[in-house]
Amino acid sequence: MADQLAIGSRRGLRPALPLLLPAYLWLTVAIFLPLSAMVFFSFMTDLPLAGKEWAFTLGNYAAFFSQGLYSTLLLASLRLGLEVTLWCVVIGYPAAYVLAKVLKGRSREAIFLLVILPFWSNGLVRIFSWAMVLREGGILDTALNAVLPFKINIDLMYSYPAVIIGLVHSYVPYMVLTCYLTLQAIDDSLIEAGRSLGASRLQVLKRVIIPLSMPGLIAGAALIFVPVVGSFMEPRILGGRTGTFYGTVIEDQFVAVFNWPLGAALSFILLAVVLIILALAAPVLRRAG
Amino acid sequence: MATTRILEWLGRFYIVLLLAFLYLPIMIMAAMSFNASPFYQLPFEWTTDWYASLWQNDQLIAATWNSIEIAIITTIISTVLGSMASLALYRYEFRGKKLLQALLFPPIAIPWLITGTAMLIFFFGVGIGRGLVAILLGHVALALPYVIVVVAARLQTFAPELEEAARSLGANQLQVTARVTLPWIMPGVIAGGLFAFAVSFDQFVVSYFLSTPGQTTLPVEIYAAIRKGFTPEINAVSTIIIAVSMALMLLTARFFKFGGEK
């Protein structure tokens, strides 16, 4: 009898509801309803507040498609996302490999923690710290001129490379993390087998290691690409006037121009792009699951 | 074999380079917060003036208290609600469970810019408006999925037979949870709580859209200050923040390995 009760209580939604409801209600009120409201709102002419006149319109979306500015900026943001992701692969993958296959024991644990630690510290502050390094008369400028025999001027601040450097710095730990997880799951004997059968290091890398760690690469790429396309704070601080991207235009609609319906439409278009990208990455990730 | 050893040393050297890339800017910022020159000029001259003047900056101090308060309340609410939900997802089988688990993904995966602006629109529309309440609502929602996922990871290591055994020995549902399950998942709950604190304390984007001039958090205040112009005072407060959040994550790592297990 007691056993039946125990097993019976594990089936059905009803006993689970009291535990689930508070969390999911909260998520509904603070995430899912707002996202729905944003879609609804993007079809309006004005805020339906304080007795203001409003009507339904497709104008906000028409603005996106008719004014080249917005689509140009979206493309610029997608390109930024692609470049940052590629740099993160180039920089992060070898590091993940060394962590997973070269370092052992306690030193591996310690260095792994050191690599991902900055990722969980304040992103805004880390971006700000680059401002000090990159500006003219900043640390990089001073250090290089102290070492080099000739005079050079390093003033990367407020430029496209500065934005790239800051974003790569922010997101490369993600790539190291996801690649490390898949790389350490690869059995060393597979690599040894390949080598003893006469494959060169490069062949083993191309035919065994990279294919097997692909899920980690794709997970990392998705997790980096998506937030970078929506970034606005990093380009603002490090890019200055050259730092106008899709994200900064959305920010402007909400805090400077106060054209919320247009901002909502632009946000929703970004959301659609992001969802398409995640959907494309999902099958690969599920296989890795 | 000689080549292998050379390659391994190159690999180690590369890791050192990566760590330098990751930590140098932060260290430079920290060093400059102790430099006397307000324009970050070298040579370096030691001072703690910038930290002293932080105490005079009422606006920054008010924002700091807001940040701490919101982070603590967020931690409490999201840890309790998240652990409950995680337990339910672990313990019960029902239709739609997969969907509920999938719903945890959007808050993590959707860029905060979109979530933040959507919250702004919705909270304004329903009359909550902007301010600390709105920020708190948002932070808890952002932290919840992390707590649920972290606690679920810990529950994976829990043997359900233990619950069955306790129940067959006469313990009721509440006793089983309190005396058997909770003690076991405690490291996960604590790690989830620390995650929640970090998510809230470091959160900038969502707070930015939901704050008003009087009701704001530290990162938002710093962003405003950076856009007005750099000062060593921002350096000082930034150094404190980064020290706090890194210490917090080191603490979290003690309770929860981020997939770093052998």
Image: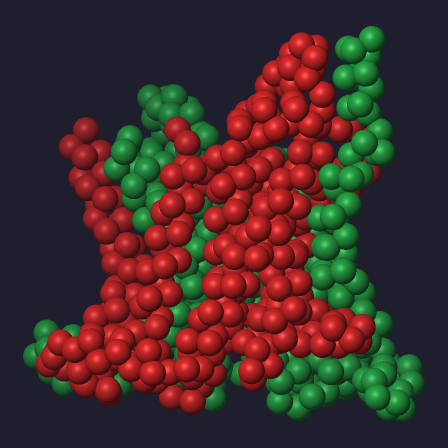
Chain colours: A green, B red
Q: In this view, does B98 lie to the left or right of A135?
A: right
Image quarter of the N terminus of chain A:
top right
Q: In this view, does A60 lie above or below B73?
A: below
State the quadrant of the C terminus of chain A: top right
| A59 horizontally vs B60: left or right | right
Where is residue A217? Give x, y as percent. 50, 47
Q: B41 above or below B129? A: below
Q: Can residue A57 be seen in this view?
A: yes
Of all residues, the one furthest to the left in this rendering is A149
> Residue visible at 71% across and 70% down?
B118
Image position, residue A138 (x, y; %): 24, 81
Front position in the image: A165 or A39 = A39
Residue A50 picture quarter: bottom right
Q: Position of residue B164 (x, y in %)?
A: 68, 15
Q: Is residue A53 above or below residue B30?
A: below
- The residue under the point 27% across, 76% down is B51
State the image coordinates of residue B33 (x, y, percent, origin top left): 25, 75
Q: Residue at x 46, y 76 (%)?
A: B62
Q: Is residue A266 in view?
A: no
In the foreground, B3 or A266: A266
Q: How many marks?
A: 0
Q: Which residue is drawn at 69% across and 88% down?
A: A258
Quarter assignment of residue A257: bottom right
Q: Nearer the viewer, residue A95 or A44?
A: A44
Work out whether residue A156 or residue B242 is closer to the camera in this orientation and state it: B242
